[in-house]
Image: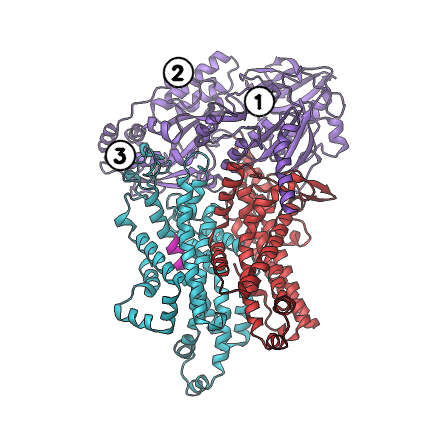
Chain colours: A red, B cyan, C purple
Amino acid sequence: MPAFLLKRFLNAAGVMLAVAFLAFLSFRFVGDPVDLMLNEQASQQQRDELRAHLGLDKGFALQFATFVKNAAQGDFGISYRNQQDVFALISERFPATFELVLVATFLSLAIGIPLGVYTAIRRESLLAKALQFGSVLGVSLPSFALGIMLILVFSVTLQWLPAFGRGEVVKLGWWSTGFLTPSGRAALILPGITLSVFQVTLVMRLVRAEMLETMRTDFIRFARARGLPARSIHFGHALRNCLMPVITVTGLQIGNLIAFALVTETVFQWPGMGMLFVQAVTFVDIPVMAAYLIIVSFIFVALNTLVDLTYAWVDPRLREDALSGAANAR
Amino acid sequence: MPADTATTVTADAAPASGRIRRFLDSDIGWSFRKTPAAWISALVLTLLIVTAFLAPLIAAQNPYDLSQIFIDKAEIPPIWQEGGEWPFLLGTDPQGRDVLSAILYGSRISLIIGFAAVLVSMLIGVGVGLLAGFHGGRIDNLLMRLGDTVLSIPTLLMAILVSAVFRGLLPPELRDPFAAMVLVLAISLTNWVQYARVVRALTMVERRKEYVLAARIIHVPAARIMLRHILPNTLTPVLVSATLNLGLAILSEATLSFLGVGMPITQPSLGTLIRIGNQYLFSGSWWLVVFPSLQLGLIVLSVNLLGDWLRDALNPKLR
Amino acid sequence: MRKAWLLAAVAAFALSGAAEAKTLKWGAGREIASLDPYSYGETFTLSVLNHVYEGLVRYTGDLKIEPALAQSWETVTPTTWRFHLRKGVTFHNGDPFTADDVLASLARVSDDASPLKGNLPAYKSSRKIDDYTVEIEVNGPYPLLLNDLTNIFIFDKKWLEANNALKPTDVGKGVTGYPTDHANGTGPFMVESRQPDARTVFVKNPGWWDKPQHNIDRIEFMPIASSSTRVAALLSGEIDYTNVAPLQDLPRLKASPEVKVLQTNELRSVFFALNLRDKLFESDVKDKNPFKDIRVREALYRAIDIDAVQKRAMRGLSRNTGALVAPAIPGYDPSQDARPSFDLGAAKKLLAEAGYPNGFSFQMNCQSDALVNEEEFCQAVASMWARAGLKPNLSMAPRAQQTPKRTRGDFDVISFGWANEPMIDAYSLLVQVIHSKSGTAGVFNWGNWGDPKVDALIDQAGVELDTPKRVALMKQALKLVKDETLFIPLHQQPMAWAMRANVETMVQASDNKPRLWLTRLK
């Protein structure tokens, strides 16, 4: 077990280094921040001085080495645009993204599991077939198009829900939450739905498949043979049996949701990490871009590693071929 | 490349008549005939593909030819609305570009990128899977670690990163002409791992079978064993994942273009068209965002329905 | 239960607009970079911070310089200016405003690490005469010091000291600063709270030295980058005002009874600049540069159907121009504003005379996020040039990606916009863009379009302290440029603000800066 642990951690560290390298490589090509940082009056000399000051005139290897050394200590430098500590900047935006992901995850379980169970139990019924079709529709709809349509209907036409932002938020220490105010909760609805649609269909299809699989197993047959009521078989045994994979996939998907939130955040002007990243791209704010990629990948890798370790602990057979792949269903 | 990808797809839908008969008589053909979702979506998809690839022949206008676009024909509504004008069936954009023509050409780009991305990721994945599964040991370890790394980055971020790197590697004047290629690479480099895993697992099983051992004993070259004997056994699951992935690939392209890191405005894909149309959402020109979104939804939906059916038909356990 | 909760949320949301009195909810096109006016030399950030911080002088609603924290000034020698400061001004925290604050601010803004150093190019040193008198020395006769000072906001020295912020933030060394997210100015509004990218709240400064013309108690500043979302928010009453109303949505906004639109032309003039080096960057003509032939430049000019561009791409809102600077800018000459008529036949003939009857290809670099409707007008002009037989190759990407190519000179034609801000004087365009690259001049001369005769006139204007003479020199320089068709002018770009009916008065100046201290709400 310790050997496995060590291997898994080394692996995670290697992945993070690869991410950092890739991220850093791409920054050399996104543009030049200097011209955006100075105004029209600045002279060429001032431009060159700033470039040298930022270390942009140094060699690639040196820049990368400095970057990795600092990042490992949690120091991502300060933002070119906001002139703020990047780590502080990102942790300020983290609650917004996390609450959005939380709502989307909640919706996906609250809607996905019942639908999955229903379509598995009554799989020949018309409604189940319609739901199956709906789930294909759900994965086929680009989330940005869905968000735009929701805004058009619920914000512009009906004027029921806000079209942008988080509404009023309450500060709890360094955390800021939208759950405690009416406008904060109202603002969560449309983006939450937009982000969750893909996830709902994923959970629904997973539950359906697992249920069908389980109901064919011997222990359900025995339960049936013993004359247990259908309800107790379906919910007491079959569903309980397939919850573990559902929870695993949901956990693994959180990393993906955080990344995908950047599309939703762009559409709804949600002040989270994703929007910070998109803005950083427009302003060539390299420290922010680097930190975002590394932090999101870190969350992702940490979740994967955690799930792997849990599984390895539960079932030693799985130690060899861990199921980190399941996370990337998208 | 367009020609290649076109034939792989239409092989299901419009091969020679003898093969159609044989197909319809087979088990799968039976299931195909009995599943309306399957044949309707196949029909719709064929129609969409054919119109997209015949775009230069049927479109009213070539949206890439600047001299055909007249700005005084800007923002004409669809033909059934007041102010609509022939031949602009679905209206025009703020440049005077015919929306239907832009959609047809845009679908062609989206489809080519989608098919090419699936093809490239399949080739990479199958190659890696065969090598890893057949040789095992250090090669296997190295390749699979590489796969783990790829899977450790959320796909969307990975695609953004890869496309930024490739765009940067190209000289500026080549970035627009090669934008489609960059997207294909970005999407396939994030998607090959699942093929590799499937093929590797199957290869490891096959490699222990007697016919492979026998072939190795008589010194049949490894490449030949892999390609002639093992590969055919892995094709079914690979093709099923490929179909299911086609929808995802097309969506990925659209998402990247919507975020502004995909196809440029001079060669708009469906995602680019939606991004531009989104700016006009409230100015009354709803047709700029609605029609490209519908087309994109329709393409992906029919691909996914077909993929779902194929997976279920080939895996009776799930039915 | 859930439904009730949803309805309550919706109702509360709908009510929240009416409940608070005299609040202006401002939906901006983007976030301000920082609360520190010395951290990012961007016009929009500075214009928002101008509600909190003030300079020694300021522009009025019609862009005349008027006293602000300085009550009067005089030049002691050609290179020394003396400022008499206003008495009885206090900062938001109660500290009195004195000469020490001015010195500390000037030291901070001219620090080597300060990104705003370039906003005060002529600054040499400053000294205190007494508590309310300051002298500033410049490094040569410089006519535009007051214009520059409108954008140099004054900090409280004690406050900077107490918060260890006498030095500016330093991106290279990773130095952050307290003023980045705290503010203490002398202006009409004070910062109450700030959540970056979401909401920054300003409240009225009851102790402002000037007599307030506004009646606003509270401003909620919210950045909404997506233009369609911003319009939706305005139509649904989530915001009261936006300083960037998308042109394509103006008809719809005007049609709404609850929304008013204010619209005029900005100071920014838009033109195309050409690569005038020995060879084109990307063309089928390899051995020479066709643009060096004035007939080709004229052909480009005359092939543009400017009325179609104005009517369609710019929605009838831009002002067509033949001059490179706007009428409000000193240096503008009405006689230079005429354009040669649009004539496709003449353009084709000129091209044939120059030896290109079948045209030639060239690369055209435009930005998707810089000028107003740039995507639209660039595509429109590209298709017009295509009809004249040329083969423009349009490259369109965000500013951040295009800028490096533009500064390197990797282009044949670029779209260019120049507002002459913060100087509000044609000298800004002349010295930064038109002058050949030499010393500090010609930073934006990316296509080698300089001309020695023009350079000489610009250099003369740069040291001329007599305003009428200086303006005459600038007009002469601009006339030479026009006669040579060195640039292809298009228009003065439009700007539009939109507000809901509860906004009673709003002053809109052509520098596109909101001045909400002149705004009244119903």
Mark toward the viewer: 1 or 3: 1
Specify whether residue A35 is in view: no
Write the start and end of the magenta stretch as one range: B110-117
Q: Are the numbered discs 2 and 1 placed on the same chain, yes or no?
A: yes
Badge 1 amino acid? Val
- Residue C326 appears left or right of C84: left
Residue C334, numbered label? 2
Q: Quadrant of the C terminus of chain C?
A: top right
Badge 2 amino acid? Pro
Cα separation, mark 3 vs mark 2, equals 29 Å
Cα separation, mark 1 vs mark 3, equals 48 Å
- Quadrant of residue A117 in the image? bottom right
- Residue C130 appears left or right of C115: right
**Pointer 3: residues within 10 angstroms few (<14), some, or many (20+)?**
many
Residue beneath the point at 66% across and 55% down:
A72
Q: Determine whether the residue tagged by mark 3 lies in a helix, strand or loop.
A: loop
Residue B113 inside the magenta-drawn segment: yes
Above or below, comparing residue B146 to residue A268 in the picture: below
Identify the residue position indicated by label 1 in the image: C503
Cα separation, mark 2 vs mark 1, equals 35 Å
Magenta-drawn stretch, dominant element (helix, strand or loop) = helix
User: In the image shown, does C427 or A161 lie closer to the viewer?
Assistant: A161
Residue A145, numbered label? none
Specify whether residue A36 is in view: yes
Residue C388, numbered label? 3
Picture coordinates of residue A93, whole percent (x, y): 64, 44
